[in-house]
Image: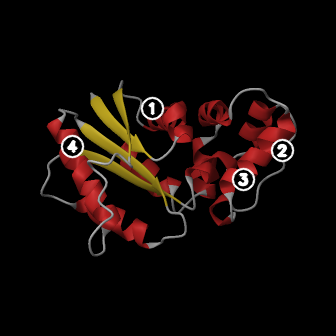
């Protein structure tokens, strides 16, 4: 099965998102990777529903390239309308292609903060349970601070890939119920 995996940044594309998807739907997926911001697909112009338009354009692109499914994750970044627009795109029926759309509340980095046991294991020092990951003002900065305190030499994107392997998925779903849990459910039903 071939999946087009589309996301926003280097932290997701370094293997973290792919690892999470493989853990949720271990069915031997072959991935193609791309970035949401690709200029010929990006659709945040015109009146409203930019995320919906972008998701639909990615559906068309994945179908055109012969993929069996599309997995698309963006950050909410404080823009709540992204959730409803992606929910609408998830239900869009004019393009027949399996899909799993996700909106990480506030950012993908929040998912990396959900499991203190995984953080402790990967970073190599005791990490306290983080406040509600979906309510942390700047999850990326929190991850950066924890990384710096660890003295690990690996890039943060590589740390994310390790965290994606180590995280307890039910803990991640429980601690990120608005963003990760719906995405995980969609991936499981691909």
User: Where is residue 18 drawn, in percent x and y?
Assistant: 46, 34
For label 3, the SS is: helix
Residue 62 visible in image: yes
> Of marks 4 and 3, which one's residue comes earlier in the chain?
4
> Of marks 2 and 3, which one's residue comes earlier in the chain?
2
* Residue for point 80% across, 44% down: 146
- Which of the two marks, 2 or 3, is nearer to us in this view? 3
User: Where is residue 167 drawn, in percent x and y?
Assistant: 64, 39
Quadrant where the N terminus is found in the figure: top left
For label 2, the SS is: loop
> Of marks 4 and 2, which one's residue comes earlier in the chain?
4
**How far apart are the alpha carbons under marks 4 and 2?**
41 Å
Please report contact status of discs 4 and 2: CB closer than 8 Å, yes or no. no
Residue identified by numbered label 3: 141
Q: Quadrant of residue 135?
A: bottom right
Query: Front-most of 126 and 60?
Result: 60
**How far apart are the alpha carbons under marks 2 and 1?**
26 Å
């Amino acid at each position: 099965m071939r999946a087009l995996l589309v996301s926003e940044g280097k932290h997701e594309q370094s293997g973290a998102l792919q690892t999470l998807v493989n853990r949720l739907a271990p069915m031997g997926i072959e991935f193609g990777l791309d970035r949401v911001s690709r200029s010929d697909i990006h659709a945040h112009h015109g009146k409203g529903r930019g995320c919906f338009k972008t998701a639909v354009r990615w559906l068309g692109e994945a179908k055109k390239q012969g993929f069996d499914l599309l997995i698309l994750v963006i950050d909410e970044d404080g823009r709540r309308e992204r959730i409803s627009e992606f929910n609408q795109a998830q239900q869009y029926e004019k393009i027949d292609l399996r899909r799993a759309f996700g909106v990480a509340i506030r950012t993908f980095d929040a998912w990396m903060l959900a499991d203190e046991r995984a953080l402790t294991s990967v970073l190599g020092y005791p990490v306290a349970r983080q406040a509600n990951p979906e309510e942390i003002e700047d999850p990326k900065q929190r991850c950066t601070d924890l990384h710096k305190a660890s003295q690990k030499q690996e890039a943060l994107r590589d740390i994310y890939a390790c965290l994606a392997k180590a995280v307890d998925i039910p803990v991640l779903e429980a601690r990120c119920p608005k963003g990760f849990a719906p995405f995980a459910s969609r991936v499981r039903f691909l």
